[in-house]
């Protein structure tokens, strides 16, 4: 590291350098150019240069796949694709990648998962010796989604606890920055048990990101750290009350560990089915037998090869039969746990 960069980092740690903006932080984490910003000097460190090079290479491969998702969505997700509405993504982890690709016109995205929120990083205050391992860990956190399109829950528990870049927030900011969004504000938020945003002893904590899409649309991204089990929601329904206050929307369920196939998640399943104009899910979402065909229009996409080995107990014979009788819509991209395109399937469910 050069003497100039070292001096800059030392001054930053003492508060003599202008604090970076949320958008600059997002671009720093995403390995995007920072010329003319408050983080230009920090980004001259060899650790960040290597991070940007490695991330560019990994993202280029991922974006080839995501371009297929983005081109598919307008044809098959109408009219919700065009709507400036809400997207609810339960069991999401920090995955803002797919909501943005499938519903780029939405006004509100609400992500809910058990992973910790974390804090907005201050890159200029990260000690030089800790910058490289912090950035390496960020890439490690994202390895599975970059390679296979989903996060591995057990790995996130360790990766998201890194001292410098912790929680889901840094990952969400990376996805937004790489999607071409400009981050306007990042603020910690809480919600009361009645679903109202509050700072006074909130029942559930989260973060609110205000951004503008590449097309200039204002968008609000919320991430809430919450357990969606029935027992917890009975005591603290804050997150569902907040979603209800926004109105109806589209729901996304992807690589959800088949939790909705087991007992103990009826509340969030029922909420999804009663508050969604469109449900986009893989087979790990709501089991097929819950969709009454007299009340739901079902369109099947791709193929159903059953769960991967670790979840083999959740095979759905009725879903396999539905695929056998249908002419599934084409996909051309992988989704969820089946990471080969010719093995993936999607279920599009709309209430009649």
Image (cartoon, rainbow, N blue to C red):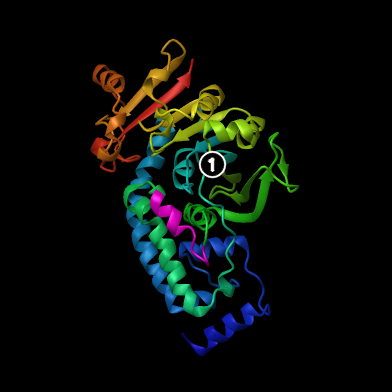
Left or right: where does residue 190 sit relative to residue 171? right
Task: Answer whether residue 159 is magenta in the image.
Answer: yes
Residue at image coords 37%, 27%: 347
Q: Is residue 43 visible?
A: yes
Left or right: where does residue 341 sit relative to residue 352? left
Image height check: is 74 above or below 188? above
Image height check: is 326 above or below 54? above
Residue 317 is situated, as x and y percent measured from the top left of the image, at 27, 21
Image height check: is 116 above or below 14? above
Q: Is residue 84 visible?
A: no
Nearest the eye: 41 or 296? 296
Left or right: where does residue 204 sit relative to residue 55? right
Task: Answer whether residue 192 is magenta in the image.
Answer: no
Residue 343 is situated, as x and y percent measured from the top left of the image, at 25, 36
The quadrant holding residue 125 is bottom right
Count the marks.
Answer: 1
Residue 28 is situated, as x and y percent measured from the top left of the image, at 51, 66
Residue denoted by label 1: 112
Nearest the eye: 16 or 227? 227
The residue segment tinted magenta is 154-165
């Amino acid at each position: 590291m050069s003497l100039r960069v070292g001096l800059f980092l030392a001054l930053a740690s003492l508060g003599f350098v202008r604090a970076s903006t949320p958008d600059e932080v997002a671009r720093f984490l995403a390995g995007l150019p920072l010329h003319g910003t408050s983080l230009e000097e920090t980004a001259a460190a060899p650790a960040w240069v290597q991070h940007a090079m490695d991330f560019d290479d990994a993202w280029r491969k991922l974006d080839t796949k995501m371009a297929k998702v983005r081109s598919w969505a307008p044809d098959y997700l109408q009219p919700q694709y065009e709507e400036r509405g809400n997207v609810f993504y339960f069991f999401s982890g920090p995955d803002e990648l797919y909501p943005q690709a499938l519903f780029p016109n939405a006004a509100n995205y609400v992500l809910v998962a058990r992973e910790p929120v974390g804090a907005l990083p201050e890159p200029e205050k990260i000690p030089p010796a800790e910058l490289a391992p912090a950035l390496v860990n960020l890439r490690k956190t994202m390895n599975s989604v970059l390679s296979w399109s989903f996060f591995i829950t057990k790995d996130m528990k360790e990766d998201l606890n890194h001292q410098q870049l912790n929680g889901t927030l840094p990952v969400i900011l990376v996805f937004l920055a790489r999607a071409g969004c400009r981050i306007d504000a990042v603020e910690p938020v809480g919600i009361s048990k009645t679903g109202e945003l509050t700072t006074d002893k909130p029942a559930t904590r989260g973060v609110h990101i205000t951004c503008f899409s590449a097309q200039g649309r204002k968008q609000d991204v919320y991430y809430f750290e919450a357990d969606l089990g029935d027992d917890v929601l009975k005591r603290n329904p804050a997150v569902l009350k907040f979603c209800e206050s926004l109105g109806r929307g589209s729901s996304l369920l992807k690589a959800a560990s088949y939790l909705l196939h087991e007992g103990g998640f009826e509340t969030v399943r029922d909420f999804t089915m009663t508050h969604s104009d469109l449900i986009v899910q893989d087979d790990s979402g709501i089991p097929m037998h819950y969709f009454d065909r007299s009340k739901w229009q079902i369109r099947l996409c791709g193929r159903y090869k059953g769960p991967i080995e670790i979840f083999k107990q959740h095979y759905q014979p009725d879903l396999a039969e539905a695929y056998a009788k249908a002419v599934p819509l084409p996909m051309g991209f992988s989704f969820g746990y089946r990471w080969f395109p010719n093995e993936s399937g999607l279920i599009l469910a709309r209430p009649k």
